[in-house]
Image (cartoon, helix red, strand yellow):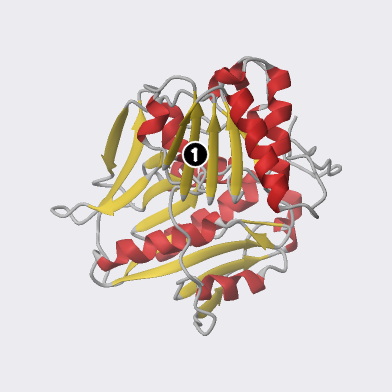
């Protein structure tokens, strides 16, 4: 697809869904698309939705800023498979020629975006943390960490279209929905039969509890690092997380050491989170970890080293032994929640 500009420059957002439920990253990207549209004269924000009996998600998309949704609703799309989804969306791209196409950097979105970019022969900037419009060229400037998070690279796709980027969940804020907003729904055919799809669903095996931990969208996260000392120490963090109605997080070194599973990892190579409260216990605060949690509303850091980098981003820092601080926090929480039954946080 060439660089030719259109009268109406379409900024597309892939509306990811599973079993008829929209992934929240879809709304985050619609908010980002609206901000980009301010700097792209003549642009419109639109959604792309695929699935089986998922038209209701289009109504939600209108509430979050989409002026139009392109829907391919077909039984072949009942369960996500790379081929039919990539085929259907690529045909839409070739037909409507969007200027920008944003996809969530989820497990599903990463694979799907690469297929689409390959099919329509355009570039793709992965795992972005910031999206802006270059003031001179008036094209998408997609920023992502590189070299292990030590540098930030801004990438421009100057010739091919659409300009594609995947964005990690929770690095961007969720816009406030407008319940009265409406838009246009355009239905398109898939153009592919079940017989043409080589991959078949034999049976569905649900993920275990660990894999389904909702770390990215938790309101409270109690994270531990190497300062916890050993895997058993995470039981203490689990207790505090349970009392606060939160989940347990972790830094990369303890995940690499096998103390907790990857599902709990926060940071550049883990999950990006934006909880209301983030407690970092025994985490030194390397840049790779901070980039994943610096967007938290309130950060409480607990570390025995007063020079630990984590204190640079903390709203409140406690210098001390976490094995003294955490039990005291647990006692304080219990004192104001005497009637609340204790429950464990999500852990390994």
Which residue is the extreme one toward the right?
203
Q: Quadrant of residue 263?
A: top right
Q: Quadrant of residue 40?
A: bottom left
> In x, y percent, where is residue 38?
27, 67
Q: Is residue 332 left or right of residue 314?
A: right
Q: Is residue 284 left or right of residue 132?
A: right
Q: Is residue 173 left or right of residue 83?
A: left
- For the point 72% across and 46% down, which residue is it? 334
> In x, y percent, where is residue 219?
59, 51
Q: Is residue 277 left or right of residue 153?
A: right
Query: Which quadrant of the rendered structure holds the C terminus?
Result: top right
Nearest the viewer among 9 and 311 is 311
Which residue is the extreme one toward the left?
136
- For the point 53% across and 54% down, which residue is it? 25
- For the point 68% across and 61% down, which residue is it? 21
- For the point 13% across and 53% down, which residue is it? 136
Nearest the viewer among 46 and 235 is 235
Bin the neighbour count of mark 1 within 10 Å (Cα to Cα): few under 14, some 14-19, many 20 and up. Answer: some
Which element is circle 1 on?
strand
Residue 91 can be seen in this image: yes
> In x, y percent, where is residue 209?
78, 39
Residue 264 can be seen in this image: no
Residue at mark 1:
300
Nearest the viewer among 209 and 226 is 226
> In x, y percent, where is residue 306?
40, 23
Nearest the viewer among 19 and 88 is 19
The answer to whether 128 is drawn above or below residue 337 in the figure is above
Number of callouts in the render?
1
């Amino acid at each position: 697809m060439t660089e030719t500009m259109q009268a109406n420059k379409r900024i597309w957002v892939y509306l990811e869904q599973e079993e008829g439920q929209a992934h929240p990253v879809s709304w985050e990207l619609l908010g980002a698309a609206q901000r980009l549209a301010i700097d792209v004269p003549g642009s419109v924000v639109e959604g792309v939705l695929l699935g089986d009996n998922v038209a209701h998600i289009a109504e939600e998309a209108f509430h979050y800023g989409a002026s139009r949704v392109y829907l391919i609703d077909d039984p072949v799309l009942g369960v996500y498979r790379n081929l039919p989804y990539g085929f259907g969306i690529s045909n839409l791209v070739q037909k409507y020629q969007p200027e920008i196409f944003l996809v969530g950097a989820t497990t599903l979105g990463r694979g799907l975006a690469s297929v689409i970019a390959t099919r329509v022969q355009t570039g793709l900037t992965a795992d972005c943390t910031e999206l802006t419009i270059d003031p001179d060229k008036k094209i998408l400037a997609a920023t992502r960490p590189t070299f292990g998070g030590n540098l930030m690279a801004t990438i421009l796709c100057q010739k091919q279209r659409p300009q594609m980027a995947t964005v990690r969940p929770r690095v961007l804020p969720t816009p406030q929905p407008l319940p009265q907003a409406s838009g246009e729904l355009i239905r398109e055919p898939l153009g592919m039969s079940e017989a043409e799809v080589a991959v078949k669903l034999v049976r569905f095996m649900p993920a275990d509890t660990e894999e389904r931990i909702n770390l990215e969208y938790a309101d409270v996260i109690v994270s531990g690092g190497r300062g916890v000392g050993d895997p058993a120490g995470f039981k203490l963090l689990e207790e505090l997380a349970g009392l606060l109605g939160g989940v347990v997080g972790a830094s990369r070194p303890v995940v690499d050491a096998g103390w907790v599973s990857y599902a709990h990892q926060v940071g550049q190579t883990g999950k990006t989170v934006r909880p209301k409260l983030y407690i970092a216990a025994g985490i030194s605060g390397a840049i790779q970890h901070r980039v994943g949690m610096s967007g938290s509303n309130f950060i409480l850091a607990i570390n025995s080293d007063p020079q630990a980098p984590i204190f640079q981003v903390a709203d409140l820092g406690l210098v001390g032994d976490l094995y003294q601080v955490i039990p005291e926090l647990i006692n304080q929480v219990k004192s104001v929640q005497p009637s609340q039954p204790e429950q464990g946080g999500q852990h390994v």
